[in-house]
């Protein structure tokens, strides 16, 4: 049953990318906000969650319903974290990626179409300036999502945060929203490409603005606050 479900899941995933994703990507080219590809990402993610047999329970969504710009800070256990985020915000949020990935042929172009934000980790001041300019021009018009652990957890354990991406986003003045996700690893853990039904539970915290121009030790305290919030709610979900 798992093999059959997984085959159907991959068929749906590829079919939507080819049948819907490519046309929407073309329609998105003249649109600086890439709205068609955002709609497509929502349809794609919702379909993949349904085919996998996943249920989604979200607590605290009222904290973000009236927010237009914010940074979702989440733990990361599975590719299904991405589908979950997209379903919650009903469209593709902006993700962060190091600038080197944009140099990869085809893949780099896909990142641009998906509105992934290019970050120069060696020049954080320029990264902050780029994000602020994009905000002012309306290019960034949806939430920004970041997984500060850096990659999916191979064993489900919540790991320490990498600081650079968070430090850059703190200097933009955008509200931060912590979020804990549990259950996505049951659907597809790191290293496995079959899918299983899973009960995915999400807890969203209250937004807060860390403050601009913080010293390094002050930023470390904000990062610790975010980590502790997510860690404590992972224990209770």
Image: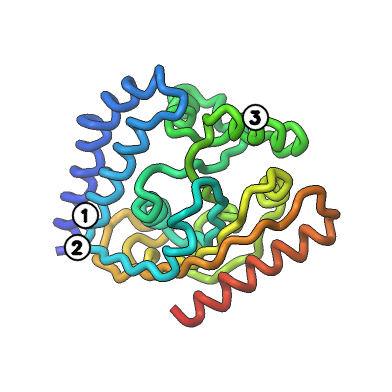
Residue 100 visible at all: no
The alpha-carbon separation of the residues under discs 3 and 2 comes to 47 Å
**Residue 229 x/y as whole percent:** 60, 72
Contact check, label 1 and label 3, Cβ < 8 Å: no
Check disc 3 and report the residue beneath it: 133
Between 165 and 59, the one lying in front of the other is: 59
Secondary element at image label 1: helix
State the residue at coordinates (67%, 56%).
209
State the residue at coordinates (24%, 38%).
14
Secondary element at image label 3: helix
**Residue 17 x/y as whole percent:** 27, 34
Circle 3: is it few (<14), some (14-19), or many (20+) Cα within 10 Å?
few
Contact check, label 2 and label 1, Cβ < 8 Å: yes
Mark closest to the chain's N terminus, 3 or 2: 2
Asked if residue 5 is positioned above or below residue 27 in the image, the reply reads: below
The part of the image, by quadrant, that contains residue 22 is top left
Point out the residue furthest to the front here. 66
Check disc 1 and report the residue beneath it: 6
Secondary element at image label 2: helix
Q: Which disc, if any, is residue 2?
A: 2
Q: How many marks?
A: 3
Between 106 and 53, the one lying in front of the other is: 53
Between 67 and 37, the one lying in front of the other is: 67
Q: Which disc, if any, is residue 126?
A: none
**Residue 118 x/y as whole percent:** 59, 33
**Residue 12 x/y as whole percent:** 19, 44
């Amino acid at each position: 049953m798992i093999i059959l479900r997984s085959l159907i899941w991959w068929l749906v995933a590829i079919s939507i990318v080819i049948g819907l994703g490519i046309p929407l990507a073309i329609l998105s080219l003249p649109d600086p906000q890439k709205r068609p590809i955002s709609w497509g990402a929502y349809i794609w993610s919702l379909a993949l969650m349904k085919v996998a047999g996943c249920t989604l329970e979200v607590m605290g969504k009222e904290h973000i319903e009236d927010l237009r710009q914010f940074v979702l800070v989440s733990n990361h256990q599975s590719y299904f974290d991405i589908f979950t985020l997209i379903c919650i915000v009903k469209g593709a949020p902006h993700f962060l990626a190091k600038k080197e990935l944009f140099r990869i042929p085809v893949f780099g172009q896909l990142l641009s179409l998906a509105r992934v934000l290019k970050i120069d980790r060696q020049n954080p001041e320029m990264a902050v300036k780029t994000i602020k300019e994009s905000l002012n021009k309306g290019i960034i018009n949806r939430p920004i999502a970041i997984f500060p652990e850096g990659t999916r957890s191979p064993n489900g354990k919540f790991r320490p945060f990498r600081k650079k991406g968070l430090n850059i986003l703190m200097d933009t003045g955008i509200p931060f929203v912590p979020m804990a996700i549990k259950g996505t690893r049951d659907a597809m853990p790191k290293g496995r490409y079959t899918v299983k039904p899973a009960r995915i539970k999400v807890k969203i915290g209250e937004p807060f603005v860390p403050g601009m121009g913080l010293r390094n030790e002050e930023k470390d305290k904000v990062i610790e606050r975010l980590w502790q919030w997510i860690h404590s709610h992972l224990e209770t979900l």
